[in-house]
């Protein structure tokens, strides 16, 4: 089976712009979670989608949003980018009947200048 | 409240020696515990999990972890370290909230450096 894929792998944006990141989960996985990883804050949970519905949400401002499509692919969007949004954004998918372990994609490295 | 703690920012060990990366948790009920490893510029890779059963869990790449309920710990171990084990290791716990939803909460990570 193919693993979790994320596109693009690298992105450079300017403050004030918006960005959309994409994640394709492992085939058959219906749960997709997003995380932000920074050296200072570590791994922070953004949100989780299951069957096209946002099930959980972390403590991030409304500029961060996401969605999930009927094929379980997910996108996250960040509007009005700030310098502090520079991070590695990780997507993970899981099968809930397998003990909840998550499988991560390689991440998208976002740099905001 | 912090759900999972990794007390060491970095662990240094000589190649061939045993290694331990520590993790303690603080969730109520029976915890679902996980270890992940992250190599530079990569996503996290699942190593092993404890849900129930034997306290000693075996995982990928020769790693194992010991669940200790009385000490609320889930330390990662390997009998003989390799230089290629050098990476960032994350402990995580699945935590349930009121309303039935749950999420995976990660520790801050421990950098393992294995020296030749």
Image (tube, rainbow, N blue to C red):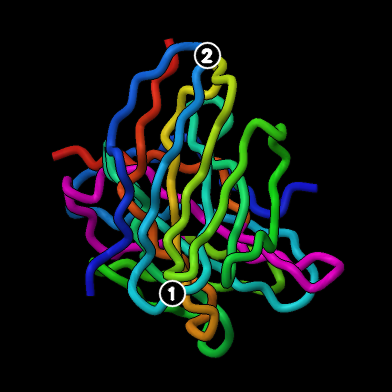
- Write down the residue under mark 1: A29
Is B38 placed left or right of B3 in the picture?
Answer: left
Q: Is residue B103 above or below residue B69?
A: above
Question: In which image quadrant can residue A81 be found?
Answer: top right
Q: Position of residue B67 (x, y in %)?
A: 56, 73
User: Residue A106, image x and y in percent?
Assistant: 30, 48
Image coords of residue A61 (percent x, y): 71, 32
Q: Nearer the viewer, residue A75 or A112?
A: A75
Element type at mark 2: helix
Residue farthest toward the front in the current orientation of the protein: A70
- Tell me, yes or no, whether the highlighted magenta stretch contains residue B66: no
In-image side of A7 versus B75 (left or right): left
Q: Chain of mark 1?
A: A
Q: Is residue B13 visible?
A: no
Cβ–Cβ under 8 Å for marks 2 and 1: no
Residue B40 lies in quadrant:
top left
- Quadrant of the frame with the C terminus of chain A: top left
Q: Which residue was labeled with disc 2?
A: A83
Above or below for A13 versus B52: above
Q: Nearer the viewer, residue B9 or B3?
A: B3
Numbered badge on residue B84: none
Question: In the picture provided, is A45 more to the left or to the right than B87?
Answer: right
Does B112 appear above or below B4? Answer: above
The residues tagged by marks 2 and 1 sit, at their Cα atoms, a distance apart of 33 Å
Residue at 54% x, 79% y: name it: A96
* Subunit bearing disc 2: A
Start and end of the magenta stretch?
B76-104
- Does the image show residue A38? yes
Q: Residue at x 80, y 69 (%)?
A: B28
Name the secondary structure under disc 1: loop
Q: Earlier in the sequence, mark 2 or mark 1?
A: 1
């Amino acid at each position: 089976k193919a693993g979790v894929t994320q596109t693009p792998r690298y992105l450079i944006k300017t403050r004030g712009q918006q960005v959309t990141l994409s994640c394709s989960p492992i085939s058959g996985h219906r749960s997709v979670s997003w995380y932000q990883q920074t050296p200072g804050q570590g791994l922070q949970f953004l949100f989780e989608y299951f069957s096209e519905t946002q099930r959980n949400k972390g403590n991030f401002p409304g500029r961060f949003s996401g969605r999930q499509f009927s094929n379980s692919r997910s996108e996250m969007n960040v509007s009005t980018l700030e310098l502090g949004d520079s991070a590695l954004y990780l997507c993970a998918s899981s099968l809930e009947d397998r003990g909840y372990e998550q499988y991560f994609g390689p991440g998208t490295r976002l740099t905001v200048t | 409240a912090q759900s999972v703690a990794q007390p060491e920012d970095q662990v240094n060990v000589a190649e061939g020696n045993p290694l331990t990366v520590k993790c303690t948790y603080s969730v109520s009920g029976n915890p679902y515990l996980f270890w992940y490893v992250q190599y530079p510029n990569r996503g996290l890779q699942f190593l092993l999990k404890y849900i129930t059963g034997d306290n000693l869990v075996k995982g990928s790449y020769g790693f194992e972890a010991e669940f200790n309920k009385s000490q609320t710990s889930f330390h990662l171990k390997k009998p003989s370290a390799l230089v290629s084990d050098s990476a960032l290791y994350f402990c995580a716990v699945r935590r349930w909230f009121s309303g039935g939803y749950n999420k995976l909460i990660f520790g801050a990570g421990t950098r393992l450096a294995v020296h030749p």
